[in-house]
Image (tube, rainbow, N blue to C red):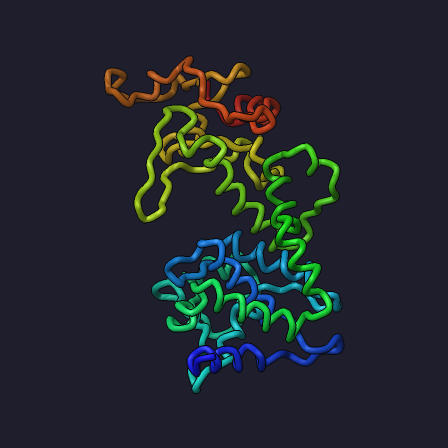
Amino acid sequence: MTTSIQKYLTAFNCLKQGVTQYGPAPHKPILLLSLIELIEKGLVPNNQFEVNADLVATFKENWLLLVTTLHQADFTQPFYHLQTDKVEGKPFWVLQPYLGMQINAPIKSVLKLSQTCAFGHLDPHLFMLLTDVSIREVFKTLLLERYFASNKSLFIEAKIHGEGYLHDQEEFVLNEPEAKYKRIIINTEEDVFVRNGLFKKLVPKIYGNQCSFTGMQLSSTFGHSFIDACHIVPFSQTHDDKVTNGIALCPNLHRAFDRGLVSISTDFTILVSDHVIEQEAHAYALKGLSGRRILLPNKQIHFPDRDALEWHREHVFKS
């Protein structure tokens, strides 16, 4: 084992853990396992771990698989406090706030944290080591055996079969039949944050990353998609983040839909408000879309909910 690897393994083996009535806090090793898993899945090729649904859901899934004590599964605490663990006097985990913002203490709201922190990043050399499959396994094994030895086998088995919190949340958001028979309750801010993030990711995906009104498909080599996940009935009214309460739209049509200038009929054709003022001869005029059938997902269980569309026509659309 090279010296450069050993110094990080030593740090992982001696994490500073809070002392509680339930024993040493397991938050930091859970966070490290989650960061390693995102690297393994190829979700952070640039060493920038954003506070998003992938990271928060992976943390919660790993927590549920590994932690048996009564500690609270608070993602925000280790995300901040891991900065106190060091290698050769320097932290191997650092937070980067957005321009003009500061993070001088834990931010207890995961939503506020996502709005304040641009990303966290590992020491570049550590990140490079963790991109190597064999080295990554060494670090993962150390964390599991050092902090969660009794549940290591269960954890590995669950990961092999794709079972756990993240899978269940995705199935629920996708309105899959088996999810209807599971008791999945939104009971924390983190659950709401995860589902909202999955909604934003999965709605464009089931529409083939195309605007359902125009068929436009626009992305970039940097991984950006310019197709939005639009709620049909606002989340603030129903807390419904299933894809059946969503539609994939390009940004201008997203704004038009939210303002009632366009809607969708019972037979999934486009309605355009008479209140639209535009150059009707223009190639991109909204009125040119009137009566056109929207693009629909491949699976009927992902189609827009007709009751939600009726609500939009009655309460939002300006006919």
Q: Position of residue 271 (x, y in %)?
A: 44, 17
> Quick check: 27 above or below 305?
below
> Quick check: 254 above or below 129?
above
Q: Position of residue 49 (x, y in %)?
A: 45, 61
Q: Which is nearer the eye, 149 or 192?
A: 149
In this figure, what is the number of numbered marks? 0
Residue at the (71%, 68%) spot, across then down:
71
Residue 281 relative to residue 270: left or right? left
Q: Position of residue 286 (x, y in %)?
A: 34, 21
| Rendering quarter of residue 299 | top right
Q: Which is nearer the eye, 126 or 51?
A: 126
Residue 175 relative to residue 225: left or right? right
Residue at the (55%, 45%) spot, across then down:
196
Residue at the (35%, 66%) spot, across then down:
100
Residue at the (44%, 64%) spot, across then down:
132
> Quick check: 141 above or below 182?
below
Q: Position of residue 110 (x, y in %)?
A: 55, 59
Work out which residue is located at the far bottom of the displayed protein and give it: 89
Q: Which is nearer the eye, 282 or 145?
A: 145
| Rendering quarter of residue 94 | bottom left
> Quick check: 17 above or below 119?
below
